[in-house]
Amino acid sequence: MSMTLVALDFDGTLTQSDLSVLLGREYDVASEIRGLAEQGLRGSGIRYDAPT
């Protein structure tokens, strides 16, 4: 029997690159994800508008 271990390090404690942005590249949304990450690092609030 074999087992596969998958670990995601989205807070960056184990890696040198931002995994969220790398994942965004796979879906052509890296710049949007990078913008959100930078807003979070600056402490800027991210507003999520709920659909009405």
Image (cartoon, rainbow, N blue to C red):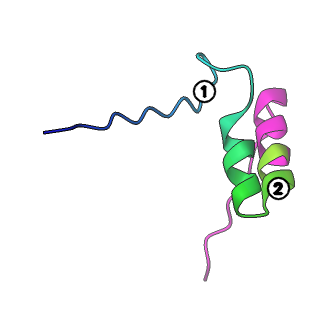
Say whether residue 17 is left or right of residue 5: right
> Which residue appears farthest toward the top when viewing the image?
13
> Circle 2 sits in a helix, a strand or a loop, which is it?
helix
Residue 47 seen from this side: no
Disc 1 and disc 2 in contact, CB within 8 angstroms:
no
According to the image, label 2 marks what residue?
32
Q: Which mark is residue 11?
A: 1
Residue at position x 67%, y 60% in the image: 48
Kindly give the residue lying farthest to the bottom in the view shown.
Answer: 52
Q: Amino acid at mark 1?
A: Asp
- Residue at the left extreme of this rendering: 1
The x and y percentages for residue 2 are 20, 38
Report if residue 28 lies within the magenta region.
no
Image quadrant holding the N terminus, namely top left
From what the image shows, is residue 9 above or below residue 34? above
Quarter occupied by residue 3: top left
The image position of residue 25, as x and y in percent, is 76, 54
Does any portion of residue 32 appear in the rendered image?
Answer: yes
